[in-house]
Image: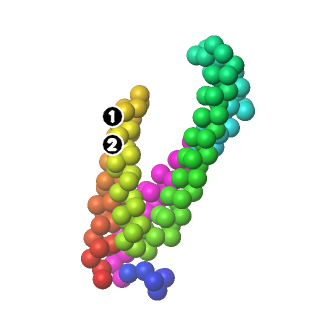
Amino acid sequence: MDPKMPPNHARNLSAWIVFALFGVLFLIYGIYAFALPSVEPTHWDDIASSSSTILYIADNFRWIGMHSGMFGVLTIAVAYGGLRRGIRWAWLSFLSFPIFFSLAIFFTWPGLMWAPFLVAALVALWVTYGPTFHTR
């Protein structure tokens, strides 16, 4: 057992995995979005008429992919390094996930597809709240 971990951290050991999986999903999506313009260069030919518009969309996809991938790596690092140990700042940083998923429900075309992620984030935060804030 890690001596730096608080004594009541058993729930943190499983709930941090939820956020690590969110990080893995963002990393996978980031790789996909970054690679898509190179792997399938004609992907946007049907929706854009000029080559400069297609290049603009492809550039945006690469940047979105790069940011999503780096966000995934950061999420995995914070989940493994901080939340797993019950460190408060890590828990507080993951409050951004319910906000992100709530906004995604209302402002993206998949809409309710994000609801299971929202529920998983809320449950993981709820489960880890006690061990994170009431062990000291």
Which label belongs to residue 102?
Answer: 2
Determine if the magenta segment contains residue 15. Answer: yes
Q: Is residue 77 above or below residue 46?
A: below
Give neighbour class at mark 1: few <14, some 14-19, many 20+ (Cα, 10 Å).
Answer: few
Q: Where does residue 20 sit, x and y in percent of width and height?
A: 49, 58
* Closer to us: 70 or 84: 70
Q: Amino acid at mark 1?
A: Phe
- CB under 8 Å between discs 1 and 2: yes
The secondary structure making up most of the magenta span is helix
Q: Where does residue 26 sit, x and y in percent of width and height?
A: 53, 47
Q: Residue at x 36, y 82 (%)?
A: 7
Residue picked out by circle 1: 106
The single residue placed furthest to the front in the displayed view is 52
Q: Amino acid at mark 2?
A: Ser
Asked whether, in this view, residue 123 is left or right of residue 16, the answer is left
Q: Is residue 43 above or below residue 82?
A: above
Magenta stretch bounds = 7-29
Q: Where does residue 54 sit, x and y in percent of width and height?
A: 65, 23
Q: Residue at x 68, y 31 (%)?
A: 37
Q: Is residue 43 above or below residue 67?
A: above
* Closer to us: 90 or 63: 63
Determine if the magenta segment contains residue 12. Answer: yes
Q: Where does residue 52 sit, x and y in percent of width and height?
A: 67, 22
**Label 2 element class:** helix
